[in-house]
Image (cartoon, grey):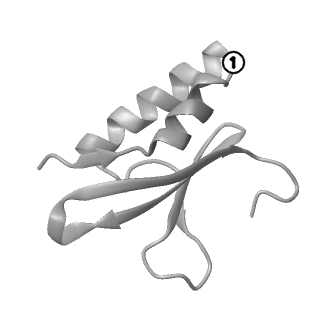
Amino acid sequence: MSWEVRIPKNVRKCIKRFPKEDRERVIETLRDFVIDPWRGDIAKIGEKDNLWRRRIGNYRISYSIFINLNVVEIKDIKRRTSNTY
């Protein structure tokens, strides 16, 4: 089963500003979402419905999964700091 990954324009711009190594790791992870959005170091965020995060080194990808549409919608990608969440 293949998933559609939707990445908003503001998130694409953010990814372009990452250091090259980090950018490549993030892009590779986004490609992995096409195959399986539940793979990797993931966790549900708080009490919110359908909001997940995936950890990639010092970065966190926030996303929603819409099972009935086979869509993964990326919400944000941030470098982990003490106030990321």
Extreme residue toward the bottom, this view = 47
**Residue 38, position as x, y percentages in the image:** 37, 56
Q: Is residue 56 left or right of residue 68?
A: right
In the rendered structure, which amino acid carries the disc numbered 1?
Pro
Residue located at (16% from left, 71% from top) = 68
Rendered image quadrant of residue 19:
top right
From this view, report whether residue 33 is shown above or below residue 22. Answer: below
Q: Nearer the viewer, residue 44 or 11?
A: 11
Look at mark 1 in the image and give the residue it sits on: 19
From this view, report whether residue 85 is shown above or below residue 75. Answer: below
**Residue 50, position as x, y percentages in the image:** 42, 75
Residue located at (84% from left, 49% from top) = 81
* SS for callout 1: loop
- Give the position of the C terminus as an image quadrant: bottom right
From this view, report whether residue 75 is shown above or below residue 26. Answer: below
- Dot 1: few (<14), some (14–19), or many (≥20) neighbours within 10 Å? few
